[in-house]
Image (tube, rainbow, N blue to C red):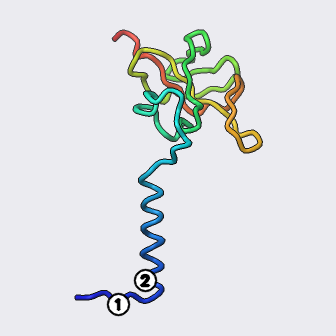
Amino acid sequence: MSINWTPWKLLFAIVFAAVTFALLYPVKGQQHSNPWLMTWINHGCCVTSDCCFEITEQDVQSLGNLAWRIKASGQVLPQTGFSPDGRWYRCACDSINGKWVVHPTALTRCLYVPRFGS
């Protein structure tokens, strides 16, 4: 059985191949300063924008029921998960003039806390 390669079928095959390639191979310019974080932090947390960083327990306030207040911004959010190394991590940055900027009052997208008692 042979495929009749009309111009539209050929164009569709080329576009499909290009999109598949783009999705499977990350852009080399998006490298994190701490590649280890990329192995376990949810990529929706701005990890590719270098917005995830270590914080201390003093930077947050427990509100109970796995909810936390970020002291610098006042933002309240549930924890995203547990960190594998027993440290605190906050993923927070804002897009300013087309660039991701980390600053104390930036929107926190994810918060990873130590697993206490382990």
Q: Residues within 10 Å of mark 1 (few under 14, many from 20)?
A: few
Q: Report the residue marked by disc 2.
A: 9
Q: Quadrant of residue 76?
A: top right
Q: Earlier in the sequence, mark 2 or mark 1?
A: 1
Q: Dividing the image into 4 quarters, which one contains the C terminus?
A: top left
Residue at left offset 69%, top offset 36%: 94
Which residue sits at x=42%, y=67%?
Answer: 17
**Looking at the image, which is closer to me, 111 or 31?**
31
Of all residues, the one furthest to the right in this rendering is: 97
Check disc 1 and report the residue beneath it. 4
In the drawing, what numbered circle is on residue 70? none
State if disc 1 and disc 2 touch (CB < 8 Å).
yes
Q: In x, y percent, where is residue 10? A: 43, 81
Q: Amino acid at mark 1?
A: Asn
Question: At 47% from the left edge and 15% from the top edge, which residue is drawn?
Answer: 87
Identity, as a three-letter code, of the amino acid under mark 2? Lys
* Whether residue 18 is situated above or below residue 65 in the rendered picture: below
- Secondary structure of the residue carrying tag 2 is helix
Quadrant including the N terminus: bottom left
Rendered residue at 54%/28% (across/down): 33
CA distance separating discs 2 and 1: 8 Å
Q: Position of residue 100 (x, y in %)?
A: 67, 37
Q: Mark 1 falls on what kind of element? A: loop
